[in-house]
Image (spheres, rainbow, N blue to C red):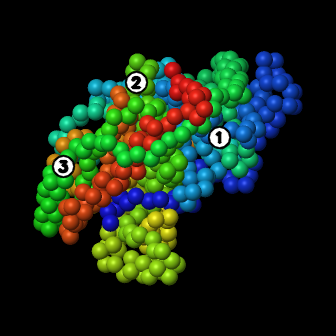
């Protein structure tokens, strides 16, 4: 099967909450007494004195309030705090494809976003003074993260603020010199990264929600410290009031219907390109090329409802809803996804990637599974493909990590999922001095499982054959935080919803012995999980005649 395999079970490597202190409290010390204009006594809000001390040494200071909210769900909290407004997001994770991870993160407010306009980095929204702009967008993103780099405070959720959003596949042209033949018909920017200042971290273990309002000091001055604190407390009060407000019922009926979608390409035209790639591979141009195609369908459903259905039908290690703002302050498009795998994570200077290649369907019994595992481990083609991706991961990390620190762990081991089993390895390395999380992302971008090998030649062939730019597909969705960590999902099993149309893209890994009809069917099957969720979302009807929760402005 293709390297871009659909997976129904997540790994236990804590995506979105990588490195969280499992079992430890995230309680902020309670204020012993109220400061003038500050929180009330016995409140868990960061005190003015604590803020002043932190502001003397940090460019970004999170003002925290922890509340008990064991009756709330991430969806209800998102609806109350974000209301699907532009610049908001919801990040969740399901371990083992079934049980929810400890943390869900809600972006309740992003005053500005860094994007690309006329080929250069540009901000829109309430653009902070001193924010880097112009030139290469990735360089501007790196300068922003460097400018706001702040040591992580202890006993807080894994994500308390940072740049959250996406890099589209075509951002690779900022990293590698590639041709540009494909049409840019959807006009999706290469990058939109939200300056996430107001967040809520839902702790499923404790039944609590940590509300976070970051004060950002762009110029490093010590002026207006008290005013910054007061502003942050006002934002916390606003979030607390919203969270405490009642919400209408979202109980709804729905139906599982066959999606009515349109294909960008016919089976015949896709098959012709598969045969072309087989010829290129036989000529020694590449070992594997991931060829994709786009599916689209009318979408009258709200993005939050598409997310609800995808969340229910395909819980995955990386689940996300991002309301991407445009220059006019309105939502330009929405991203809804349920991705099974990461591109790269960075935690305390250690970068990690997980090459996956080699697949078998699960058996009906334990005995069947054991036989299938033996068959997979003995499959020369699957093992060759896996080794190729492990080597690619080592080479990618080797470009940004200290010499001698790049290691392969648990090489070629079997991981069982609900419907399939995979060959999986782990590659880690310690970032070299002067290298940061964004360097690790750029080194691994795009994933070999979404491009091929050798990566650059595979991408050249992709650009020759795919009629339109990939946009978000094959890029990443995730965050780079103010503390220097990162967690990024490969943008597969993802819908882009724009102007009443949902776009879903999926691919298949073409190798020398590929069958064109099989590869076309594989791409279609991968897209069906998202297309089916969109179709189901359009059948949602409030139960008992109650109005649905408002989806925002």
- Disc 1 is placed on an element classified as loop
Question: How packed is label 3: few (under 14 Cα within 10 Å), some, or many (20 or more)?
Answer: few
Q: Nearer the viewer, mark 1 or mark 3?
A: 3
- Disc 3 is placed on an element classified as loop
- Disc 2 is placed on an element classified as loop
Residue 416 circle label: none
- Residue identifier under label 3: 266
The N terminus, quarter of image: bottom left
- Residue 143, percent across and down? 45, 34
- Residue 296, percent across and down? 30, 40
Label 1, label 3: how many angstroms apart (C-alpha)? 42 Å
Residue 501 or residue 321, whichever sits in front: 501
Residue at coordinates 76% horizontally, 26% vertically from top-left? Answer: 48
384 on left or right of 489 = left
Residue 73 circle label: 1
Residue at coordinates 20% horizontally, 70% vertically from top-left? Answer: 513
244 on left or right of 43 = left
Label 3, label 2: how many angstroms apart (C-alpha)? 33 Å
Q: Nearer the viewer, mark 2 or mark 1?
A: 1
245 on left or right of 119 = right
Question: How packed is label 2: few (under 14 Cα within 10 Å), some, or many (20 or more)?
Answer: some
Residue 326 circle label: 2
Instruction: Name above or below for residue 171 compared with residue 124.
Output: below
Which tag, 3 or 2, sits closer to the chain's start? 3
């Amino acid at each position: 099967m293709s390297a871009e395999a659909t997976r129904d079970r997540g790994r236990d490597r804590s995506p979105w909450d990588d490195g969280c202190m499992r079992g430890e409290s995230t309680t902020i010390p309670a204020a012993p007494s109220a400061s003038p204009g500050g929180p009330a006594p016995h409140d868990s809000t960061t005190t003015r004195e604590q803020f002043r001390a932190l502001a003397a040494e940090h460019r970004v200071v999170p003002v925290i309030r922890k509340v008990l909210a064991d009756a709330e769900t991430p969806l209800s909290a998102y609806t109350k705090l974000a209301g699907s407004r532009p610049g908001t997001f919801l990040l969740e994770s399901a371990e083992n494809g079934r049980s929810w991870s400890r943390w869900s993160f809600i972006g309740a407010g992003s005053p500005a976003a860094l994007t690309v306009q006329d080929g250069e980095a540009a901000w829109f929204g309430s653009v902070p003074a001193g924010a880097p702009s112009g030139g290469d967008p990735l360089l501007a993103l790196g300068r922003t993260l460097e400018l706001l780099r702040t040591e992580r405070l202890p006993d807080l959720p894994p994500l308390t603020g940072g740049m959250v959003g996406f890099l589209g596949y075509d951002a690779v042209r900022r990293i590698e010199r590639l041709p540009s033949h494909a049409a840019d018909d959807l006009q999706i920017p290469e990058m939109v990264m939200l300056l996430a200042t107001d967040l809520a971290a839902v702790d499923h273990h404790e039944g609590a929600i940590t509300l976070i309002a970051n004060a950002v000091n762009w110029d490093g001055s010590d002026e207006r410290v008290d005013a910054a604190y007061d502003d942050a407390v006002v934002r916390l009060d606003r979030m607390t009031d919203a969270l405490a407000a009642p919400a209408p019922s979202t109980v709804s009926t729905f139906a599982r219907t066959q999606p009515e979608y349109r294909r960008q390409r016919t089976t015949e035209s896709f098959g012709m390109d598969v045969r072309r790639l087989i010829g290129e591979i036989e000529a020694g141009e590449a070992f594997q090329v991931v060829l994709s195609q786009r599916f689209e369908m009318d979408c009258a459903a709200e993005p939050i409802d598409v997310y609800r259905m995808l969340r229910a039908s395909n819980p995955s290690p990386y689940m996300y809803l991002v309301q991407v703002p445009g220059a006019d302050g309105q939502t330009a498009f929405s991203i809804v996804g349920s991705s099974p795998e990461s591109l790269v994570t960075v935690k305390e200077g250690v970068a990690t990637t997980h090459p996956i290649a080699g697949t078998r369907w699960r058996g009906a019994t334990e005995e069947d599974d054991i036989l299938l595992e033996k068959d997979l481990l003995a499959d020369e083609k699957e093992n060759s493909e896996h080794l190729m991706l492990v080597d690619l991961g080592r080479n990618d990390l080797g470009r940004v990590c200290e010499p001698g620190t790049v290691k392969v762990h648990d090489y070629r081991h079997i991981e069982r999922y609900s419907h399939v089993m995979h060959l999986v390895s782990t590659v880690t390395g310690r970032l070299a001095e002067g290298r940061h999380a964004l360097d690790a992302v750029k080194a691994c971008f795009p994933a070999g499982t979404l491009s091929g090998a050798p990566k650059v030649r595979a991408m050249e062939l992709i650009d020759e054959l795919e009629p339109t730019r990939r946009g978000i597909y094959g890029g990443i969705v995730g965050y780079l935080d103010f503390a220097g960590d990162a967690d990024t999902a490969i943008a597969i099993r993802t819908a882009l919803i724009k102007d009443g149309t949902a776009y879903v893209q999926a691919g298949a890994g073409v190798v020398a012995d590929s069958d064109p009809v099989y590869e076309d069917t594989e791409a279609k099957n991968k897209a069906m999980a998202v297309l089916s969720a969109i179709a189901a979302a359009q059948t949602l009807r409030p139960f008992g005649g109650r109005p649905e929760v408002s989806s925002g402005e």
